[in-house]
Image: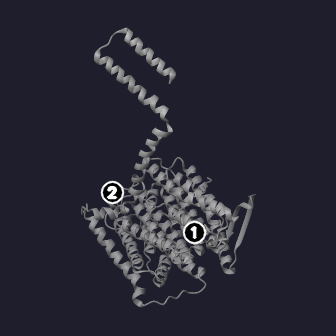
Amino acid sequence: MFNLYNFWSLFFLFLSVCFFLLGFNYLYYDYCLLIDWEIFNFNSCGVVMTFIFDWMSSFFVSGVLMISSMVILYSSSYMALDINKNRFLLIVLFFIFSMIMMVLSPNLISILLGWDGLGLVSYCLVIYYGNYKSFNAGMLTIMVNRVGDVAILLSISILLNEGSWYFIYYNYMSFELGNIVLLLIVLSSFTKSAQVPFSSWLPAAMAAPTPVSSLVHSSTLVTAGVYLMIRFNDYLMGYNMTFFLFLSVMTMFISGLFANFEFDIKSVIALSTLSQLGLMMSICFIGYPVVSFFHLLIHAFFKALLFLCAGLIIHCLNDCQDIRYMGGVSGMLPYTSSCFSIANLSLCGLPFMSGFYSKDLIVEFMSLSMFNGMIYLLFFISLGLTASYSLRLLYYVMFGYINLSSFNSFNEDLSMMFSMIILSFMGIMSGSMFTWLIFPYPILVFIPVSMKLLPLSFVLLGGILGYEISLFMYNNVMWDNILLYFCSSMWFMPFINTFSLSSIGLSSSFYYLKMMEVSWGESIISFLFPSYLIYLSSIFINYQFNNLSIIFCTFLLISLMIIFI
């Protein structure tokens, strides 16, 4: 029987290998190919469709296609009983094509096609299940992403004066509105990559099906903003980026802190994605775009693996996502537990796993940069928090006894297992492989022994802290402290971004609708005139006027008023 899911999975896997070989060729020869198609020309400003093929775009597209291939293969089993599974596949394909369009574009017009497509299709995926929670999450997701879309449109309108939208050719300091263009580009990337203060939509987007979460939060939607910053990095370095660096580091710290108080397994993994996005953004603003891209590429594989393992665990536990009801999964799902542990340890930065190569390099480059102690301290605390929530997740899910029910059905499907083993291989080997490929010579950083051992010390301390937090919450200790509530609610950011804005906006819009849109005449006819009739009838009832002439005169008066009004 012909299976659409298997066909597209094999097709994307083949394309992934082709793009990887293409990127290797471009990297080896230091070669770049630019394909340009002019659609029409308007006042010496050409509207063009452009594709750029260099080692960075080719490697990134290869990673996106490999993860997409594994996710689609996984979905063939995960969504097997869904009545709309073909529609689901079609939406996922649109999503992947939008991401590829965005990655291969060095032109703001063609970037907008992929950028807007990502936002719209992600809304369709988030509301896929069609319940109240999904609709709320989808609306929050698309509204925040529209802010970034508007920023891209405004930057396109500003660049109209320059005669072209090729951002790779410009030195933005050379014309008057260059700083505004860069500010708009940073704003759009912050909304897409969910940096502070736009972070609330990313945990809410977990309402989507788990395979979609694996795709969205590893290599596609949330990484689009980081990729845009990497492409614009040559122009960012002409300005002072300290404020944006501070926001990125605060994103990394807040999400790591919040993940230690969260009990939804998908939300914990989503917050770990947010923490890693803050790490990529911060090292990009420090001035190392290639290192940021290196971590972006490696992180995509083990984060997709983490989501796929979590999806299978949720599937086997009767669609329960609360980690307090889990436990003892390592005995029931040994293969999935092994892959889950590999992905978690790679996320922590365990030596010689793939995450170690990029995170250790980022921390060492950050140590060599000329920033103050607060940035330095927040970096290392965030590293410790990463190990903390990873150990906490392992403690709740893998060890002990199952806390849900005595009767469960555990099954590891073959297609799910195959997609996990490929991503497990990449989660272990991709760090060393891309280190040898991307960097032309071995990177040697001379720092004192104490600074060299500091990341490892914070990872160990964070692991101990995660174990202690797990014991603290596992023993049903009630905590109603406002400080703990403040830390566990992401510093009230979801409430600020939703209720505080919508309540003021809704009440004021209703007021203006009533007073301005509906107009004064409508208000007079619909409100004042019936009130006058009610007033007259109350007078007649009170004084018991039953005289027919008075009623006839009143009727005549009302008829004249209606005619003349």
Instruction: Residue 179: give its label.
Output: 1
What distance separates the C-alpha of mark 1 from that of mark 2? 55 Å
- The answer to whether residue 302 of the structure is visible from this angle is yes
Helix, strand or loop at label 1? It is: helix
Q: Which residue is drawn at 41% across and 81% down?
A: 455
Neighbor class of circle 2 (other Cα within 10 Å; few <14, some 14-19, many 20+) is some
418 and 143: which is toward the camera: 143
Side of 232 where 506 appears, left or right: left
Q: Are marks 1 and 2 in contact (CB under 8 Å)?
A: no
Side of 515 where 479 appears, left or right: left
Instruction: Residue 346: give its label.
Output: none
Q: Is residue 398 above or below residue 145?
A: below
Say whether disc 1 or disc 2 marks the residue closer to the N-terminus: 1
Q: Residue at x 49, y 32 (%)?
A: 521
467 and 253: which is toward the camera: 253
- The answer to whether residue 95 of the structure is visible from this angle is no
Instruction: Residue 404: give its label.
Output: 2
Q: Is residue 273 above or below residue 141?
A: below
Q: Quadrant of the rendered structure where residue 224 is? A: bottom right
Give the amino acid type for the residue marked by disc 1 in the picture: Asn
| x and y percentages locating residue 392 in the rendered image | 35, 69
Give the amino acid type for the residue marked by disc 2 in the picture: Leu
| x and y percentages locating residue 145 in the rendered image | 52, 57
Q: Quadrant of the rendered structure where residue 189 is? A: bottom right
